[in-house]
Image: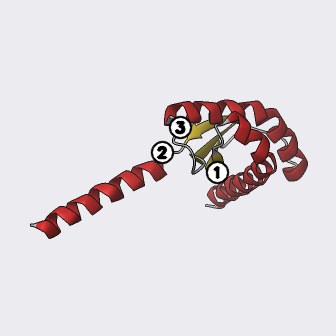
Amino acid sequence: LAELQKSQDSQSLMQEEISLILAEYQDSLMGKTCGALITVTRVVVSRDLGEAQVYFSWTPPSSMSPDPEEVTNRVKEALGGLAPELSRRLWRRLRIKRLPQFIFEHDVSLESADRIYGILEKLAMEKKDQ
């Protein structure tokens, strides 16, 4: 149980630190990501600290309706380019012996939740009309 708690604490701490670092780079990232605002939604670190899956979501600027796949690919590429800097900064801030290799994944859970909400709302409207 203590090991599980330690793992959850390290994941939360790493998510918080990555979010802070990304916030510092947000302006430069926006130029590479069609203006998308990037949010780290969760970080899953392997037990041996060899890998960290960094899940992100993105929000387009209100003036655009970009191709979601293109933006997701651009965000992954931009975050991948920032990985060495993330590693350096995390090492300085967290002082951990081994830094993980970062794997950036688009978190689709928010879009799925929105889609389900839309379907439920539509069904409720149809039922109301009957």
Q: Quadrant of the N terminus?
A: bottom right
Q: Residues within 10 Å of mark 2 (few under 14, many from 20)?
A: few
Quadrant position of residue 6: bottom right
Left or right for 67, reference 115: right
Type of residue at label 3? Pro
Type of residue at label 1? Thr
Q: Nearer the viewer, mark 3 or mark 2?
A: 3
Type of residue at label 2? Val
Q: Which residue is mark 3?
A: 66
Measuring 36% from the left and 51% from the top, which residue is drawn there? 115
Give the Cα separation between the discs numbered 3 and 1. 17 Å
Location of residue 119 in the rendering, given as x and y in whole percent from the top left corner: 28, 55
The outermost residue toward the bottom is 128
Measuring 33% from the left and 54% from the top, which residue is drawn there? 116
Q: Which residue is mark 2?
A: 108
Measuring 82% from the left and 33% from the top, which residue is drawn there? 84
Location of residue 44 in the rendering, given as x and y in whole percent from the top left corner: 62, 46
Location of residue 74 in the rendering, given as x and y in whole percent from the top left corner: 63, 31
Q: Nearer the viewer, mark 3 or mark 1?
A: 3
Asked whether disc 1 touches disc 2, contact meaning CB atoms under 8 Å apart, the reply is no
Q: Residues within 10 Å of mark 3 (few under 14, many from 20)?
A: few
Helix, strand or loop at mark 1: strand
Q: Which residue is mark 1?
A: 39
Helix, strand or loop at mark 3: loop
- Can you see residue 50? no
Location of residue 40 in the rendering, given as x and y in whole percent from the top left corner: 64, 50
